[in-house]
Amino acid sequence: MTIIDIGNRLSGSISPYLLQHKDNPVHWLPWGEEAFRLAQELDRPILLSIGYAACHWCHVMAHESFEDPDIARVMNAHYINVKVDREERPDVDRLYMQALHMLGEQGGWPLTMFLTPDGTPIWGGTYFPPEPRYGRPGFRQVLEEIARLWQHDREKLLKNARALSQALAQREHVEPATVSLPDDLPRKVSQALIRHFDPEKGGIGGAPKFPQCPALNLLLHAGGTQAQQHVVNTLRHICQGGIYDHLGGGFARYSTDELWLVPHFEKMLYDNSLLVSTLAIAWLQTGDELFRLRIAETIDFMERELHIEGAGYAASLDADSEGEEGKFYVWSYDEIHGIVSPEHFELFARAYDITPGGNWEGRIILNRRHQPMLMDDEHERILARERRRLFEARERRVRPARDDKVLASWNGLAISAIAQAGLALDNEDWLQLAQTRYREVRNTLFVDGELRQSWNRHLLPTPATADGVANMMRAALDLYQATAATDYLEDALDLLRLLHDHYIADSKDAFCFTHDSVRDIPLRQVHGEDEATPSYQGTLAENLLHLTHITGDTRHADMAERIFLRFARDMVENPLAHASLLKAFWLSRSGVKAVLAHGEDSRETLRLLATFVRQLTLLPPVAHLLPDQPLRDLPPHLQAAACAEERPALIACRGQTCAMPVHRKEDIPAALELIWRMA
C-alpha cells in the first residue's frame, strides 16, 4: 500500500459534524474541487461518507472504524476520502441516497458510497461494522474488495457505475403526464391511507414508527371525520409516548418500536417544527388541551435549547451523551424515587410507567402511553410540580451536544410553525416570537438578494437548496397572513423571483433542488417526494396558491398547475410519498380562503380572523385589504370588496365564489355553512 500524506483537511470546516472527524487518522477532505482533482490525478475511487452531528450510528461507525489506525491506513492507501454534512449539502446527500435505493438498499445514515473519480456512484451502503456482524460485511473487507476490483477488474465497477448513472438521469427526465388528476383524489388517497394505520396505537405501519407529518396533515385537511380520528389518536400517543420528552419538551425523531415508547433520542428542529404545525391544526379540530400543552412546551423547548442569540434556531441535539445513547433522558427507579415527593410518588409512578424493573433495558423512559388522556386539573398540577423536580435534577447531567448550524430550510419550518400556532391559538406572544426569529434568520442568511444554506458563526457560501427558499417563503407568507404586515409579502415575492431566476427547471414545470450556480454535483435534481420534511415542490405549489389569492395574479396558479401535472403520475401511484403535493392540490380544488377588509382598528379585524380560523378549524390563505391601500394597487377580485367595506369585514371564499361580508363573530358560522355548500 502506498500512502500519500494528503492529511486530514476538516479542521477549517464550520460544520460540527465535519469537526467531529477532524482528528481522525483518515485523510478526510471536504466535498469539492480538490477532492475530485486528487482522485483523478491519483486514479483512485472516492469513498464518500455522509452523516450529521446528531446521528448515533454515525458516531458508532466513527469510533469503530474511522478512529481505527489500521482501517484508516487502508482508506488512505486506496481512496480519496470525502466527508459531507448532509445538512450543509442535502443535494449531495439526496443524489447518492437515490443511488443507494437503486441498488435495492434501505437508506439511512451514515451513508457510505464508493464513487468514480468524477463522482459517479459505484456501490454503497449505510453503516458497516468494522468486522462482519449483524448480517453485514465488515468495513475493512468492503474497502479491500472495492480496491482490488478497482485495480484488477475495473470494468466490472465501471459497468455498475454507468448503469446507476443512467438510472439516475432517467429519473430526472419526465415524459408529459398522461394521468389526469380528479378533484377528489386527495379524499380518495386519504381514505386509502387510513387502512394502513395502527387502529390502537396510531401511526402508519410497524416499528420503527415515524410521525410522518406530511401524511397526517393531508388527512387532517382532506380526509374527513374517520381520517381525523386516526390522526388524533396517533398524535395523542405521540404526545404521551416516550418519543416525547415529558420533562423538557420536544419530540425525538422517531420511535424504534411500534408503541411510541423507545425513541431514537436525537431531537431535530424540523421534527419539532412539523409537529407544532400539525398539532395546531389538530387543536383547531378538537380543542384537545393535550395538544395545546404540547405546542406550548415544544416552543419553550425550541427557545430554551435550540435558539442561538441573534441568529435563529440550531439544527439538532445529539442522541448521545457521555458516549451512550439516551443517557441524558433515561432514569433508574431509585433516582426517581429519591427525587419525587413521597406523598405523590404512587400517583407519579402510575402516570409515567415507573416500575422497579424499568420499561427499557432495565431503565425508565418516562411516558403516559397507557393512559393518553389528561387527568383532572388538580392531578395534572401535581404531576407538573413533580416533573419540575426531575427536570431540575436532569439539568445537572452532562448534556447532549448541540449542532449549532442555522439552516434556512429548517428555520423556515420553525418560524412558520410558531406563526401558525400563534394564529390558531390566538397567541400574540407566539406571533411576536415568530417575527423576531424571522428577522434574525433574514439578517443571518440573506446576502445580496440570495438565501444561503446555513450559518454557524460563519456564513456558508453555498446557496440554499430549494427547500430552504420554499420554507422561508412560507414563513413570510404565514407572517403576512397573521399580521397584515406587507413587508413579509414583499419578501415572499422576492423569494419567488429568486426561484424563477435560479431554480426553475428547463421544462418550466417544476423547480430544481439546487441553485443554477452550483456546479460541483454530477446531476441537477428535480423531485417531488416528501422525505423527513415536506416536498419543496408541494410547499411551493401551496405558496403559489396563497399568492394567487393575495395578489390576484393567476400566473402563480398556472405554475402550481404545471407542478401538479409534472408529478401527476407519482401522486397517483405513490401517494404516501407525495402527501404534501396532494395537500396543495386539495387547496387548489377545495380549500377555503379569506379576505379581511381592515377598518381603522386592525387589531379588531385580526380578532375576526382568529375567530374565523377557529370555526373553520383550518388555516386558510388570507388576503388583507388595508385602509390606506390605494384601490388601483388591489387585484381586481378584491377591488369590489374594498369599495363595499368601510369597517372591519371578513369575506369567506371557496373557489371563485365568496359569501357576503361579515362584520360580527356571530355571523361567521352562517358564512362557513354557505361556502362549504358551494361546489
Image: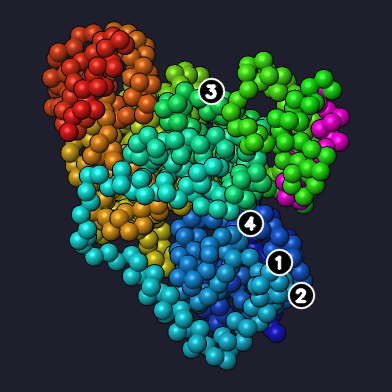
Residue at numbered disc 3 = 289
| Gap between marks 3 and 2 measured at Cα | 57 Å
Q: Position of residue 448 (x, y in %)?
A: 39, 42
Q: Nearer the viewer, mark 1 or mark 4?
A: 1
Residue at numbered disc 2 = 70
Left or right of residue 195, residue 348 in this image: right
**Amino acid bearing label 1:** Phe
Residue at numbered disc 1 = 66
**What crowding class fits label 3: few (fewer than 14 Cα within 10 Å), some (14-19), or many (20 or more)?**
few
Front in this rendered view, residue 205 or 293:
205
| Gap between marks 2 and 4 measured at Cα | 21 Å
**What crowding class fits label 4: few (fewer than 14 Cα within 10 Å), some (14-19), or many (20 or more)?**
many
Front in this rendered view, residue 109 or 385:
385
- As drawn, 280 above or below 98: above
| Gap between marks 3 and 4 measured at Cα | 42 Å
Residue at numbered disc 4 = 18
Lower position in the chain sequence, tag 1 or tag 3: 1
Q: Nearer the viewer, mark 2 or mark 4?
A: 2
**Among the 4 quarters of the image, the one containing residue 18:** bottom right
Does residue 232 belong to the magenta stretch? no
**What crowding class fits label 1: few (fewer than 14 Cα within 10 Å), some (14-19), or many (20 or more)?**
many
Lower position in the chain sequence, tag 3 or tag 2: 2
Which span is picked out in magenta?
324-341
Q: Position of residue 304 (x, y in %)?
A: 64, 30
Lower position in the chain sequence, tag 1 or tag 4: 4
- As drawn, 674 above or below 513: above
